Amino acid sequence: TTGQGIRFGQNGGIGRLAVAKNINIGAAGFTAGMLRLQNFTQLGTTNHSFNMSANSYFYGSNNHWNGDFSVTAPRLYSASSYYGAQLYLEKTGATNDYSAGGNTVLGSATLIHAGSNNLLFGNTLADTFMQNVSIVNRGIGTVYIGNNNNGHYIGGHLDIIQSSTGTSNSIQLANSSNCFIRVVGNTTVQNNGSGTNNHIYLGNNGSILFEGSLRLSNIGSSTNGAIYLNHGATSNNN
């Protein structure tokens, strides 16, 4: 609840979690500092759920998780990690959070921005989602998916919901010109927020391949709400 937190493997050490064991946050909660799990391998299949608050920060890098994995935290970061089941990540704080990417998720994935400023995935490495992905922005700011690099992959359906109420909010897929995202399943996009500027960009400067159907709904009460496809000169969606 005070100090700089609890950190595993920050300077290169390796951690293993035994079969049938869990990591749990105690009754006092995790309200300050960083919960850092790095170079960490789960040998069993138990599920993990970390609910953090106040000024805390979840940082995960180069990890291997076999069970369902859930994090709700003011700040969060995930890079070069394997999630063998369902993944749930929710940002609730006010600081920009830029995840490098390189994650592989075998189960369904839910990515939620419920704070402010920006939440970014796939900044330097491609992320791979083997099943369905849900992206929700109900905070104030921008969610970036597949921000940079080639080879981002979504093997199931993609659901995007922008329900923000703030002044300037967006969800942006394939933001940079060198970015490419492949979506195998059907894509459903809902822009239903009430903020002043609520935008969704499908291919801001990069490109997206939609192999399934694409359904767009711009139904919010925003005074300047729009869904953009092939927005930049270098964007080429199919």
Image (cartoon, rainbow, N blue to C red):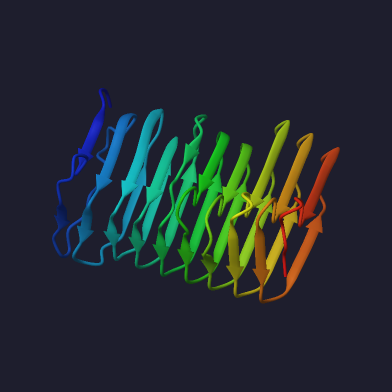
Q: Position of residue 8 (x, y in %)?
A: 20, 43
Is 48 drawn above or below residue 99 in the view shown? below
Query: Number of numbered discs present?
Result: 0
Q: Position of residue 111 (x, y in %)?
A: 52, 52
Res 230 quadrant in image: bottom right
Q: Position of residue 209 (x, y in %)?
A: 66, 69
Q: Residue at x 53, y 67 (%)?
A: 153
Is 180 drawn above or below residue 35 in the view shown? below
Q: Nearer the viewer, residue 199 or 115?
A: 199
Q: Residue at x 26, y 26 (%)?
A: 4
Residue 14 in view in this figure = yes
Residue 221 in view in this figure = no
Q: Is residue 122 left or right of residue 222?
A: left
Res 85 quadrant in image: bottom left
Q: Residue at x 19, y 44 (%)?
A: 9
Q: Is residue 91 left or right of residue 197?
A: left
Q: Residue at x 15, y 51 (%)?
A: 14
Locate the C terminus by quadrant: bottom right
Locate the N terminus by quadrant: top left
Q: Position of residue 147 (x, y in %)?
A: 56, 50
Q: Is residue 164 left or right of residue 86?
A: right
Is 61 drawn above or below residue 68 in the view shown? above
Res 196 quadrant in image: top right
